[in-house]
Amino acid sequence: MKPIKLFVSAAVTVAALAAFAAAPPLTVDKKAPLLLDDAPAAKAVPALPRLICYDCHGNFRDEPFSLTHAKNKVTCVTCHGDSSAHASDEGNITPPEMMYPRDAIAKKCKGCHEEHAAPPAAMAARQKERGLEKTDAKSLVCTDCHGKHRMNVRAIHWDKTTGKLLGGAKKRSE
């Protein structure tokens, strides 16, 4: 670098530092009202450590079930395992590490949510009131009422107990 450019660069840096030093310090007005009634600029999605899940499972990005859990630091990985092989399988034949058949959903949920405030009969009555299909208390599972934690369109099906590929994708021959 030529000496003249170095001198100009140093002069600009010194001037910028002087202006910064002369500026008044930032202060927080603790008496200012919180504007809670203002709508947020955009819908905030919690930062999740495993956003790769959303590459294929984008319908869960704004799903209330997923958002509520994410706010409490319960992520996809918490319930479905790391599932690295699943996430990196472009052929989409590798299942997630953990899946839950219908009869295992309540047991998984009860691992964190020990009690449910509504008795089964009340839940079934509410389902019937909403015009939903499942109105028998014995057939209801947590995700029938809490979120729509299912893929909107399934391109592939696995046995959720064994992880065996049932259909919808062809295994590539190398």
Image (cartoon, rainbow, N blue to C red):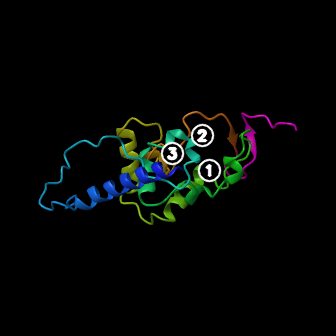
Q: Quadrant of the C terminus?
A: top right
Residue 83 visible, this orientation: yes
Is 164 contained in the magenta span?
yes
Cα separation between marks 1 and 2? 21 Å
Q: Is residue 136 left or right of residue 44?
A: right
Category of crowding for the residue at label 3, using alpha-carbon neighbours closer than 10 angstroms: few (below 14), some (14–19), many (at least 20):
some
Query: Which contiguous range is marked in magenta?
Result: 159-174
Cα separation between marks 3 and 1? 13 Å
Category of crowding for the residue at label 2, using alpha-carbon neighbours closer than 10 angstroms: few (below 14), some (14–19), many (at least 20):
few
Q: Is residue 97 left or right of residue 75?
A: right
Sequence-earlier tag: 1 or 2 = 2
Badge 3 amino acid = His
Residue topped by disc 1? 101
Which label is found at residue 149?
3
Label tally: 3
Residue topped by disc 2? 56
Residue at x 50%, y 54% (from the top left corner): 48
